[in-house]
Amino acid sequence: MSKSPLYTVLLIEDDAGDALLIEEILEQQECLARLVTAERLAEGMSCLQHINCDAVLLDMNLPDSSGLSTMTRLIDFAPGIPIIILTGDSDESFAIEAVKLGAQDYLVKGSIDGKILKRSIFYAVERKKLELALKQTRDLFERQARIDYLTGVYNRLMLNELLEAEQQRARRSGADLSLVMYDLDHFKKINDSYGHTVGDHVLKEVAQLASNNVRAHDILARWGGEEFVVLVPNSDLNQAILLAEKLCCLCRSYDFGNGLQVTASFGVTQFRADDNTESFTVRADEALYLAKRNGRNRVESI
Ligand SMILES: [Mg+2]
């Protein structure tokens, strides 16, 4: 009984002799790979769309593409696929460049034998898997560094970055920018009376409620504890007050479970040309303080 092929390998090679040679070498390796062939880069890309390939053997000089750009075009097209460069003796330095740009390995055409090819494919596939897994982990860490673990909205670190960017944009373009800062009323009582699990649930629901009711380009973040902010681009003070009133009303009338009611106090302010992050956020905080002092469950602005 013949063994089923371990990998599907796409060979993109315009030289029929070279292609045949690779094919023969692979055949001798007890069907390590099923080979799919293409003579042009475009044809190879089309194969990748239709066939689930594990690796690509790539000749960089093809009728429709030549040099390093053959490799970079392919990697841009299919970033997840391991590429092994096939090269002649004379252009080995190109192949090394290609590896630096993201190819997994290169093979010099004149000196390919079965063992080398088999090992190169195996390592290319495995190394690419590792590379992708590492990238996923890195993306996850990067995400975690910017997202509040409890509520899933941006954390303060991310907000500070976005605040800087939005203030610069507002300064440059003269567009309006406003800030809504809000804080749940008597939140400590909720934790004390119902426990932290219920407290956490309320925070999550409040974040969700806001997230469902701001515009796509508004920026919602947890400022800390039971305090949230919404950075509202292209909105003047009155528009931001309307948004705050809406969120205040939604919060007040929302059932947080078993009839639990929670209200929040809101402070709103609009960006001024001479503001910096500190003066902008301090003013929102002062407005919020005003809302607390004036009886909570309300919106105040400065
Ligand atoms: Mg060629």
Image (cartoon, rainbow, N blue to C red):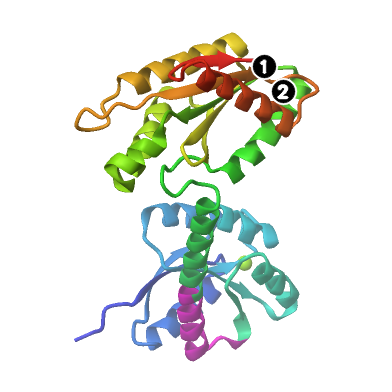
- Residues drawn in magenta: 111-126
Viewport quadrant of the N terminus: bottom left
For residue 48: magenta? no
Q: Amino acid at mark 1?
A: Asp
Which secondary structure type mostly characterizes the magenta part of the structure?
helix
Q: Quadrant of residue 254?
A: top left
Q: Report the disc number at residue 269.
A: none
Residue 57, horizontal then vertical, whole percent: 52, 70
- Asked if residue 288 lies left or right of residue 101, the reply is left
Where is residue 79? Give x, y as percent.
53, 57
In which of the image's four quarters is ligand 1 placed?
A: bottom right
- Can you name the residue that lies furthest to the top here? 238
Where residue 173 appears, x then y in whole percent?
75, 20
Nearer to the camera, 288 or 181 = 288
What whole-number distance in Å separates the C-alpha atoms at marks 2 and 1? Answer: 6 Å
Q: Is residue 8 above or below residue 154?
A: below
Query: What element does badge 2 sit on?
Result: helix
Decide: few, some or many residues near mark 1? Use Cα within 10 Å; few <14, some 14-19, many ≥20.
many
What residue is shown at x 60% (from left), y 88% (from top)?
111
Task: Name the mark on residue 170.
Answer: 2
Residue at 26%, 26% (x, y): give it. 255
Question: Is mark 2 in CB contact (under 8 Å) with mark 1?
Answer: yes
Circle 2 crowding by C-alpha within 10 Å: few under 14, some 14–19, many from 20: some
**Viewer-side residue, 42 vs 55:** 55
Residue 183, compared with residue 93, is above or below; it is above
Residue assigned mark 1: 176
Residue 79 seen anywhere in this rendered image of the structure: no
**Picture quadrant where residue 261 is located:** top left
